[in-house]
């Protein structure tokens, strides 16, 4: 199970929580949690509660059920409840890597970064080759703006195991420290992935800083062929055309084309109104305002 929260790297930079994906591990939970829909409880919930009340649970059963409950709470976004269960599981076995990984993830969701760091550092003490812990520690230190520490963890990941997330995070770090050539090299390896606003904006900034506007122009035009019906890409595309290439009229045509095909989209209409304002097309603005929702009118007049 791979979880991603990127606020990084927006809201959507990544924190991955693998609860049960390691194959070949002898951990008691592995076979039971490969797929959420195939959870195989040793005890029924009612039996578990009955045994708990009578204090008949074994140490292993206490650990297992607390972990399973913690995972379920975490998957449902109930992080405080998940935290309590996972801490109970650790009381039974303080060196359970799966519990520590899930606990680290939960702590990050609660913005308790320092405690999350301790969890993942303990994971690495128990398993020096744990890629998940390296990734998440790299991410946490990126969020803390401690880029040197972030790179120290990411560099430990073998090149053959670097996925797009690791390359993206490395690229973002290079952007932050203004190492534009290295940033471009990392971006080049991942720009065929699906559109993400922050990713494309940082790549755009990198090419602008390297004075590669022609390369940028070709890139955004090529991606328009693929994402011409994606409103977020349309907004990114037209803003880029206006800000870096002074293509205000072309931007207007693209926005109108999108609305003609897809219908009303408040964000796209708002961008169109700003575009028209730049061109002093006041009558056209009035016409659009008469036909658009009040929410858009308010934003446009601010």
Image (tube, rainbow, N blue to C red):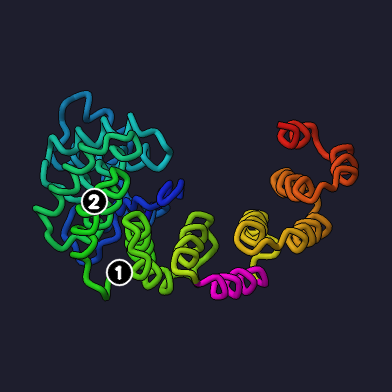
Horizontal placement of 283 versus 86: left or right? right
The residue to which callout 1 is attached is 162
The residue to which callout 2 is attached is 137
SS assignment at label 2: helix
Q: Quadrant of the N terminus?
A: bottom left
Give the mark nearest the N terminus, 1 or 2: 2
Q: Quadrant of residue 82?
A: top left
Residue at point 9% right, 53% down? 125
Residue 245 counted in the magenta span: no
**Residue 108, position in %: x, y?**
31, 40
**Residue 255, position in %: x, y?**
76, 57
Horizontal placement of 100 versus 8: left or right? left
Residue at point 86% right, 43% down? 282
Of the pair 255 and 57, the residue shown nearer to us = 255
Q: Quadrant of residue 21?
A: bottom left
Any part of residue 32 in sight: no
**Residue 267, position in %: x, y?**
69, 45
Residue that sits furthest to the left in the current view: 125
Any part of residue 218 in sight: yes
User: Which stretch appears magenta?
Assistant: 212-225
Q: Compared to 160, does 48 lie above or below?
A: above
Residue at point 64% right, 55% down? 239
Q: Quadrant of residue 232?
A: bottom right
Q: Quadrant of the C terminus?
A: top right
Of the pair 79 and 41, the residue shown nearer to us = 79
């Amino acid at each position: 199970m791979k979880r991603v929260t990127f606020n990084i790297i927006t809201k959507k930079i990544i924190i991955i929580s693998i609860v049960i994906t390691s194959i070949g591990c002898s951990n008691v939970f592995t076979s039971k949690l490969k797929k959420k829909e195939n959870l195989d409880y040793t005890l029924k919930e009612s039996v578990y509660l009955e045994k708990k009340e009578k204090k008949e649970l074994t140490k292993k059963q206490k650990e297992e059920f607390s972990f399973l409950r913690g995972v379920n709470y975490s998957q449902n976004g109930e992080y405080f409840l998940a935290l309590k269960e996972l801490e109970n599981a650790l009381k039974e076995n303080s060196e359970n890597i799966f519990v520590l990984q899930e606990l680290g993830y939960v702590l990050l969701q609660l913005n308790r970064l320092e405690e999350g760091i301790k969890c993942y550092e303990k994971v690495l003490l128990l398993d020096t080759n744990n890629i998940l812990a390296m990734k998440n520690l790299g991410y946490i230190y990126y969020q803390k703006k401690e880029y040197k520490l972030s790179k120290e963890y990411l560099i430990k990941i073998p090149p053959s195991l670097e996925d797009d997330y690791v390359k993206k995070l490395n690229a973002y770090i290079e952007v932050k420290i203004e190492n534009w050539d290295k940033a471009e090299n990392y971006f080049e390896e991942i720009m065929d992935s699906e559109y993400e606003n922050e990713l494309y904006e940082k790549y755009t900034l990198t090419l602008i800083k390297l004075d590669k506007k022609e390369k940028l122009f070709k890139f955004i035009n090529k991606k328009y062929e693929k994402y011409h019906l994606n409103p977020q890409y349309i907004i990114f595309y037209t803003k880029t055309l206006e800000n870096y290439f002074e293509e205000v009229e072309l931007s207007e045509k693209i926005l109108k084309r999108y609305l003609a095909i897809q219908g009303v989209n408040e964000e796209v209409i708002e961008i169109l109104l700003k575009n028209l304002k730049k061109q002093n097309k006041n009558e056209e603005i009035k016409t659009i305002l008469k036909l658009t929702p009040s929410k858009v009118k308010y934003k446009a007049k601010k």
